[in-house]
Image (tube, grey):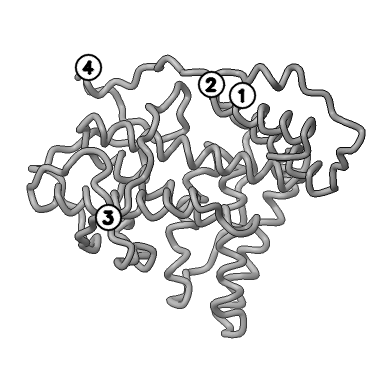
Amino acid sequence: MAALAPLPPLPPLPAQFKSIQHHLRTAQEHDKRDPVVAYYCRLYAMQTGMKIDSKTPECRKFLSKLMDQLEALKKQLGDNEAITQEIVGCAHLENYALKMFLYADNEDRAGRFHKNMIKSFYTASLLIDVITVFGELTDENVKHRKYARWKATYIHNCLKNGETPQAGPVGIEEDNDVEENEDAGAASLPTQPTQPSSSSTYDPSNMPSGNYTGIQIPPGAHAPANTPAEVPHSTGVASNTIQPTQQTIPAIDPALFNTISQGDIRLTPEDFARAQKYCKYAGSALQYEDVSTAVQNLQKALKLLTTGRE
């Protein structure tokens, strides 16, 4: 993709829009890295800002300039299916957020705690916020968002206090709403890939504290090759080097090959839309060489089209 033209600058962020400042920062960070992600981050900020305050003069001015950026991006990305088709855009964003989550989760489970991993957890949670531009989140996305935001807070506080974080999923309390921690100290996180930090040198500011036990998320897979996360620069330490991992391909259900759509099966427009969505998800997964996710979604589409059931 050719380099994008510079976008119109934004005026200072009104205080009312503090809750979307990190989504806008994420958009800026992805202007060159993944303009589709950058576009939807701005769209989320625009929609959220309109709900917060669209009448105050400073807010109206800010939203107007943000709209100019969206229009400029849309014009430059006009031939990109992830912009012109919501199904493709949603699949692109979900896969991107998941890969960033899995990178951070892989580092966490391996006991490699550093700023980049914290930032990847937090950014994944922000991108799951952005997925709401396409509609309600799935239960899985809600759990991943809450877990990622809590993990970023928990590990940050441990390193700040000179403590060793507990690796892996240690659970979170349902009655402690991590979603309210909008700031979560993300302003102190790096905007560019950084070297992993030890607890003795890690000293960002004010991520809120929390003590969580309870909900467990399913064990995460190791991040596959080409994970779109901000992988730290090489430090010469073998344990911090991300290596491509062997992927486990789900077994194909033999019954799917022998299933022929019967005459009494009537597929609804919603069935066709869901099947198309699964196929788009599969295509997006293949962009990241995630064969397992692609196969799972293709199987779901095939079963739906041949049986009328999911």
- Which kind of residue does numbered mark 3 sit on? Gly
Which residue is label 2 attached to?
A: 250
- For the residues bearing labels 1 and 3, Cβ distance under 8 angstroms: no
The residue that appears at 66% across and 56% down in the rendered structure is 70
Seen in the picture, residue 214 relative to 190 is either above or below; the reply is below
Q: Which circle's residue, 1 or 3, is located before the other in the chain?
A: 3
Residue drawn at x 66%, y 63% as measured from the top left: 67
Q: Nearer the viewer, residue 242 or 165?
A: 165
Q: Quadrant of the N terminus?
A: top right
Residue at left offset 48%, top offset 48%: 140
Q: Distance between the residues labelled 1 and 3?
A: 32 Å
Q: Which tag, 2 or 4, sits closer to the chain's start?
A: 4
Q: What number is the disc on residue 214?
A: 3
Report crowding for label 3: few under 14, some 14 to 19, many 20 or more residues within 10 A (C-alpha): few
Q: What residue did someone put label 1 on?
A: 295
- The span from disc 2 to disc 4 (Cα, nearest Å) is 30 Å
| Upstream in sequence: badge 2 or badge 1 | 2
Residue visible at 28% across and 22% down in the picture = 234
Q: In this view, does 119 lie to the left or right of 133?
A: left
- Is the Cβ of the residue at disc 3 closer than 8 Å to that at disc 2? no
Task: For mark 2, give the secondary structure.
Answer: loop
Tell me the distance, in whole angstroms, between the alpha carbons under discs 2 and 1.
7 Å
Residue 141, relative to residue 262: is it above or below? below
Q: Residues within 10 Å of mark 2 (few under 14, many from 20)?
A: few
Q: From the image, tell me which residue sits under label 4.
A: 238
Amino acid tagged 2? Pro
